[in-house]
């Protein structure tokens, strides 16, 4: 899960947990589903940030690689 998906789950979970006021007759608890999505989104975002730094992060692609120069000497004629 990436950071974008984590933030999306946080937003959907917060909407379901705090903004929606629907009575479903006890079949589905939208507030509980919202809290679950909120927790999963927070954990996913935190884990993505932890693993992002361990895999190199944004500086991984900006580092320069030194070119190896081989010198070939010819025999004098």
Image (cartoon, helix red, strand yellow):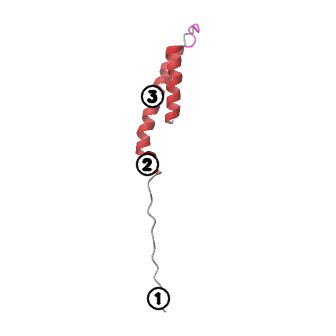
Q: Residue at x 52, y 33 (%)?
A: 4
Q: Residue at x 41, y 43 (%)?
A: 53
Q: Residue at x 43, y 41 (%)?
A: 51
In three-dimensional space, the C-alpha distance between marks 1 and 3, rounded to whole angstroms, equals 67 Å
Residue 55 appears anywhere in the view: no
Residue 38: image location, x then y, percent: 48, 23
| Disc ID at residue 45 | none
Q: Which residue is mark 2?
A: 59
Answer left or right for 25 relative to 48.
right
In three-dimensional space, the C-alpha distance between marks 3 and 2, rounded to whole angstroms, equals 24 Å
Label 2 crowding class (10 Å Cα cut-off): few <14, some 14-19, many 20+? few
Q: Residue at x 49, y 25 (%)?
A: 10
Closer-to-camera residue (37/3): 3
Name the chief secondary structure element in magenta. loop
Residue 2 in the image: above or below residue 37 = below
Q: Which residue is mark 3?
A: 42
Residue 26: image location, x then y, percent: 56, 8
| Disc ID at residue 75 | 1
Residue 46 appears anywhere in the view: yes
Residue 76: image location, x then y, percent: 46, 90
> The residue tagged with tag 1: helix, strand or loop?
loop
Label 3 crowding class (10 Å Cα cut-off): few <14, some 14-19, many 20+? some
Residue numbers of the magenta segment: 23-28
Residue 27 in the image: above or below residue 51 = above
* Cβ atoms at labels 1 and 3 below 8 Å apart: no
Q: Nearer the viewer, mark 1 or mark 3?
A: 1
Dot 2 or dot 1, earlier in sequence: 2
Residue 3: image location, x then y, percent: 49, 35
Q: Nearer the viewer, mark 3 or mark 2?
A: 2
Residue 77 in the image: above or below residue 4 = below
In three-dimensional space, the C-alpha distance between marks 2 and 1, rounded to whole angstroms, equals 44 Å
């Amino acid at each position: 899960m990436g950071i974008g998906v984590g933030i999306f789950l946080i937003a959907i979970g917060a909407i379901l947990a705090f903004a929606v006021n629907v009575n479903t007759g006890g079949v589905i608890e939208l507030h509980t589903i919202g809290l679950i999505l909120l927790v999963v989104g927070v954990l996913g975002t935190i884990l993505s940030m932890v693993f992002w730094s361990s895999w190199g992060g944004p500086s991984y692609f900006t580092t320069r690689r030194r070119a190896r120069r081989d010198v070939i000497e010819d025999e004098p004629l």
